[in-house]
Image (cartoon, rainbow, N blue to C red):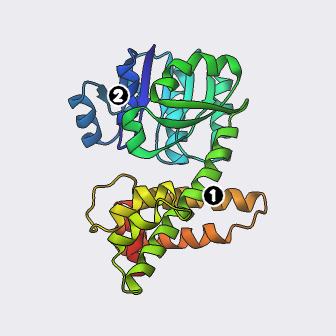
Amino acid sequence: MKVVFVGVGAIGLPMALQIKAAGHEVQGVDVAEISRQRARAQGIETVERYSLTRNADVVVVMVATPQQLMELIEEALPAVSGQHWVIMSTVGPEAIIAAAEQLQRQGACVVDAPVTGGTARASTGDLVIFAAGEQCSLSHVAPVLNAMGRMKTVGNRPGDGQGIKVINQHLCAVHIVAAAEALNLAHLLGLDPAQVLPLVEGGAAGSWMLSDRGPRMLQGTDVKVSSAINIFVKDSTLVADAATACAAEVPLLREAHARYLAAANAGLGQHDDSRVIETWQ
């Protein structure tokens, strides 16, 4: 298939490379020059704006915010008829429903397909993809989605995938902050967190986030960025908004959200999300 991939940043580029490795023709789009340079260095032609792309069978969207998604759609609307749009960004149910309505009115098919697994699993093609849409659309884009990971069909309408991702991000946000709090507690108890981590992560207290983020929490501020603090500021805000909309009580999420905001306000917004541990220091 001819695929346009919008957003070839830290997680988007390895996803696009997996699609290319599966035999599809991929063209990238990214507003950041550094992202375009990295994509070109790895063999993916990349342009600054969607309007500069060639016609595509499938458009994969991995932008950061609901506003960026709506701006992209406004630019693309005149040429979307007959295309399949796969929106993989974490933007929340309301944003995806509004985007789908616009695209479908202009003759596009829409699949809501947020992902989980981070850059590590993006690089190995082992993301978990929460896909929602009409069956014919899911079948059409399956060769592209299967190149990036394991597609789990979670519903038949745009918004269902984002709902699952809201729950996923609730747990991720809380687990990262819980890991940071626990490792800080180990330090204050006079223990060596580097020795504590391998002892607890394999038992009942373990979690994927503890094992993944924990080692980076033990490093310095400038540890390599896998996912930035600002991403969890955005995602935990989406979770809080979704909870408010359905009158759900999420006190743990709100505490975690406050920690990400504190980290961002301390100048750590562009640093790895593991650096939330510095809000205890």
Foreground pick, 212 / 47: 212
**Amino acid type, label 2:** Leu
- Mark earlier in primary sequence (1, 2): 2
Find disc 1 in the rendering and name its residue.
239
Dot 2 crowding, Cα within 10 Å, few <14, some 14–19, many 20+:
many
Residue 117 in the image: above or below residue 261: above
Dot 1 crowding, Cα within 10 Å, few <14, some 14–19, many 20+:
many
**Amino acid type, label 1:** Val
The picture places residue 134, in percent across and down from the top left corner, at: 71, 23
Q: CA distance from mark 1 to mark 2?
A: 30 Å
In this rendering, position of residue 272 left or right of residue 73? left
Residue 17 in the image: above or below residue 254: above
Quadrant in which residue 222 is drawn? bottom left
In what element is the residue under mark 2?
Answer: helix
Outermost residue toward the left in this view: 41
The picture places residue 12, in percent across and down from the top left corner, at: 40, 37
Q: How many numbered marks appear?
A: 2
The picture places residue 185, in percent across and down from the top left corner, at: 45, 81
Viewport quadrant of the C terminus = bottom left
Find disc 2 in the rendering and name its residue.
17
Residue 78 in the image: above or below residue 1: below
